[in-house]
Each structure stands twice: as C-alpha cells, then as structure tokens.
C-alpha cells in the first residue's frame, strides 16, 4: 500500500483543490457560497475517499472508488456550469478538465484492477 501523499491520483486531486481554494473566494457572491462550496466539498470528498480506498484491501476498495467517481462527475459538472456562467474562462476550464481526466482514468484503472 503506497503512502497516500505519493499516489498520482492524490497529487492530481491536491492540485485541483489548490486551484479551487484560490478560485472560490474570487467567485461572485451568488455562486461562492453554494456552487463554490459544493465544488470544494466534492474535491475534499474525493481526497478523503482516495485515502479511504487506499486503506482497504482488494475488492473492498471498489465502493470507495465508486463514490470517488460520483464526486468526480459532480465536480466536472459544476465546473462546466461555472464556465457557462462566465465565472471561469475556457483556459481555466481546460486546466481543470485535464486534471480531472487524469483523476478519472486513474480511479477507473484502480477500480478495474480490483473489480476483476
């Protein structure tokens, strides 16, 4: 079992969190306290679920990974909404999507490995 802080999925999620922590306080008030907080919560949940999955053995990881993927999908959707409402620009969205794609691929690979 690798240390949580060394896992590539954790490092990518940590980077997303770092960017969100600087984005959310600058969001318009109408979005900051509902959508912004939901994005932070989803990202923090993803990181927590990565830690939880990493402490499990074998197929016991799969339920945590499934929940992680659900939070991942929620965060992607909220980021797309923020782009549609001009809270973030295309360049910012592209950066988030690249990181989230890496996280999704890693999580699905992790899940497929333990589901088989």
Image: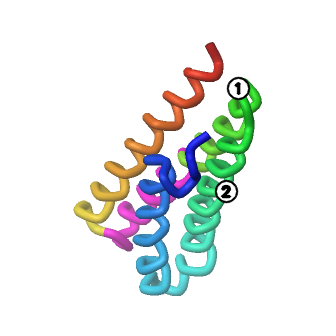
Q: From where the camera sits, is residue 31 visible?
A: yes
107 with respect to 54 (left or right): left
Q: Where in the figure is residue 89, as x and y percent of width and height? A: 28, 67
Q: Nearer the viewer, residue 74 or 30?
A: 74
Report the disc number at residue 14: none
**Quarter placement of the N terminus:** top right
Classify residue 59 by image quadrant.
top right
Q: Where in the figure is residue 39, as x and y percent of width and height? A: 56, 64
Is 76 included in the stretch rendered in magenta? yes
Q: Residue at position x 32%, y 49% from top? A: 98
Residue that carries the numbered disc 1 in the rendered image = 58
Q: Secondary structure at mark 2?
A: helix
**Magenta residues, dominant SS class:** helix
Residue that carries the numbered disc 2 in the rendered image = 48
Q: Residue at position x 61%, y 59% from top? A: 42
The mark tally for this picture is 2
Give the magenta-colored segment's residue range.
Answer: 73-88
């Amino acid at each position: 079992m690798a240390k949580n802080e060394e896992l590539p999925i954790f490092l990518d999620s940590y980077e997303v969190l770092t960017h969100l922590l600087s984005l959310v306080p600058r969001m318009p008030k109408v979005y900051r306290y509902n959508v912004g907080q939901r994005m932070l919560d989803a990202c923090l949940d993803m990181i927590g679920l990565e830690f939880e999955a990493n402490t499990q053995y074998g197929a016991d990881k799969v339920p945590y990974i499934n929940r992680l993927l659900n939070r991942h999908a929620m965060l992607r959707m909220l980021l797309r909404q923020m782009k549609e409402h001009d809270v973030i620009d295309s360049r910012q969205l592209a950066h988030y999507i690249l990181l989230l794609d890496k996280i999704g691929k890693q999580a699905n690979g992790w899940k497929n490995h333990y589901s088989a």
